[in-house]
Amino acid sequence: MKKIGIADTTFARYDMYRSAADELNSIGSGFRIERYTVPGIKDLAIASQKLIENGCDIVLALGMPGPEEIDKQCADQASRSLLDVEIKHSVHIIEVFVHEDEADDDKGLGELADNRAREHAVNAYDLLFRQDRLQRMAGTGQREGHPDAEPIR
Amino acid sequence: MKKIGIADTTFARYDMYRSAADELNSIGSGFRIERYTVPGIKDLAIASQKLIENGCDIVLALGMPGPEEIDKQCADQASRSLLDVEIKHSVHIIEVFVHEDEADDDKGLGELADNRAREHAVNAYDLLFRQDRLQRMAGTGQREGHPDAEPIR
Amino acid sequence: MKKIGIADTTFARYDMYRSAADELNSIGSGFRIERYTVPGIKDLAIASQKLIENGCDIVLALGMPGPEEIDKQCADQASRSLLDVEIKHSVHIIEVFVHEDEADDDKGLGELADNRAREHAVNAYDLLFRQDRLQRMAGTGQREGHPDAEPIR
Amino acid sequence: MKKIGIADTTFARYDMYRSAADELNSIGSGFRIERYTVPGIKDLAIASQKLIENGCDIVLALGMPGPEEIDKQCADQASRSLLDVEIKHSVHIIEVFVHEDEADDDKGLGELADNRAREHAVNAYDLLFRQDRLQRMAGTGQREGHPDAEPIR
Amino acid sequence: MKKIGIADTTFARYDMYRSAADELNSIGSGFRIERYTVPGIKDLAIASQKLIENGCDIVLALGMPGPEEIDKQCADQASRSLLDVEIKHSVHIIEVFVHEDEADDDKGLGELADNRAREHAVNAYDLLFRQDRLQRMAGTGQREGHPDAEPIR
């Protein structure tokens, strides 16, 4: 039985946890989910570390940085810290960030957040249970939330 | 009995410690506060570490970066270092920074600093004593100091 | 018998693994290749660490960052994390990144990716088996993927 | 008997060590000073670490970054590394940087460097010997080298 | 008998190793030189670490970043990683970078690279054998490769 951690924030405007958990449960079994909610994206690194210390085999870190310049700086700090935790514990943390300026309106933003959370949930499942599937898709321009890119042959 | 650390600076132009401590004491009990004052925001990381080494279960790091480009760089350095300390000790540090250019005048700046310190004091309390409250607010666009954002359903 | 790790991504639009592996096998022997495929460039650091933990003597980290500003930031985060893993384990990781805006069209991008992967595969081989060859080329303006620069005498 | 380390550079155009040491000696006693001079600001982190390894209870790191864009980048690297050393050893390092473009001419720059070194020497003394003094000044807009800012009541 | 490490790259367009080694040998004795050549500046950190692990008492890291924006980013990554290695091992690493856009033509660039490598070789020698010489030059505006700046009295 594997454990998948999901860290999310009260700052985000969309409940990406529901999308990720729903997708995971629709793919397969052999795991259970543990959740840790924090105020903002800068708190996701320690949330992920606490999930790992609590036995999680992989973590999804869900966040929605704002559209301002300072938000980009915060997102950068949060990302680097997630990477630090990942390397410290040698456990995959999949960063699932949706920037508020990636969509034109709330409807588009909600759809993007839902899609990206779902597609990265599949990535988490693949890293845990079926790495060969990732290897078959290597170099093929996979994108999460947006349409895939064209592979160059 | 939990211990909440509060690190603050002589550089800041508003006494955010008073706001945070007042708010904490108004929410509940079961904790005591320890304070460590340093010159500037770059000193908040080591101040937070010393509070943690002294037994604090969570830390609020209060700072007011200036409005210039170099101040943004200093704030970025300070933030990253706070994250490093957090990960090193696996103890939450809540960064409460108020940038001088976030408000139009001193009155607005003081109100923002007071509000943000108070709202993050609640976050600290929630992380320590009532994590379920944070989970119920996940993905709902909570903002500290400014009005909350609209959740996307 | 040495082990050469190759980490690559499903995000990349060109299969650089094939180029690197093909080049390595054409240079010599005395090694075998282990592959680890992850979703994106930010996952290359932990992929490289897992390859090192699994006994690899050197790692090639293959990635294709997108052309947007946010992609540059992600590439920067990924690079720094690769450096952290390298220093932590004292094992060479050769970063082989091809930025989508380095070429005018897909044909040029594919050729660049193929060339760069091959030339860095030679670098990996040299670092493992023939360091004297690198020393003889020191200060001579070697470039990977693009034509070499002129040495200044 | 405490030990105060002072790290400085041959790159700086003003002898800030003299200012800091003179100020320290004029405030009080109970300490002695150890000095370590390095070429440039990027060497201040290891200089500070060596002073700490040699028993210093606090360190003043004195530097004068140049006015160009690349100098800002170097100063940023130097600052981050100073923070890393601080956190590694849990010893305060007070960064005293004077940027060449902070003053209009050499006279102003010299005065700024002298003032800032002296005011941060007082901070170092306060952190070591009278932390209550810092606490009383919390949130009052203290500035080092420039006139203090107005506190917001 | 001390050991001075020199790390250099095949990417550089000028053989700075020869300048540094020649200068070191002309200053004095009591040391021997060990060299480690890598492909690019991002490999200098691990090269320096390997030299330190091999017993070097100080390291000169020689590199020539290109003139593009992406090259500045790579140089920044390389510098930070060199600082990390320095702090990890508490051994001085002197970064000797010559940016391609620091000179107007190849002749100027070659002279700058030669001068900077030589002047930093003297710094390395001073840090190892005559620290008092550095202390006497503290705050005097020393520059490596370019003419010294005016000290402010």
Image (cartoon, coloured by chain):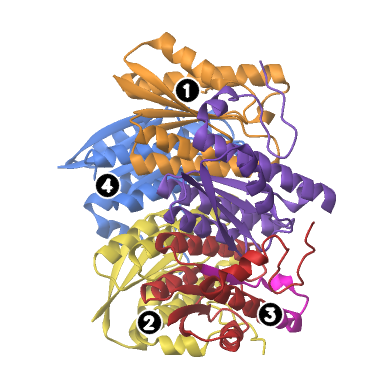
Chain colours: A purple, B red, C orange, D yellow, E blue
Q: Secondary structure at mark 1?
A: helix
Where's the C terminus of chain A, which quadrant? Answer: top right
Badge 2 and badge 3 in a common chain: no
> Badge 4: how crowded within 10 Å, few (<14), some, or many (20+)?
many
The nearer-to-camera label among 4 and 1 is: 1
Q: Which residue is mark 2?
A: D125
State the image coordinates of residue A128 (x, y, percent, origin top left).
Answer: 50, 37
Circle 4 chain: E
Task: Identify the amino acid type marked 2.
Answer: Tyr
Badge 4 and badge 1 in a common chain: no
Viewer-proximal residue, C11 or D76?
A: C11
Q: Which residue is mark 1?
A: C120
State the image coordinates of residue E111 (x, y, percent, origin top left).
Answer: 46, 34
> Badge 1: how crowded within 10 Å, few (<14), some, or many (20+)?
many
Q: Splitting the image into 4 quarters, where does residue E103 fall?
A: top right
Circle 3 chain: B
Alpha-carbon distance for marks 2 and 1?
Answer: 53 Å
Q: Which residue is mark 4?
A: E125
**In the displayed structure, would residue E108 be above or below residue D36?**
above
Q: Are marks 4 and 1 in contact (CB under 8 Å)?
A: no
Q: Which residue is mark 3?
A: B115
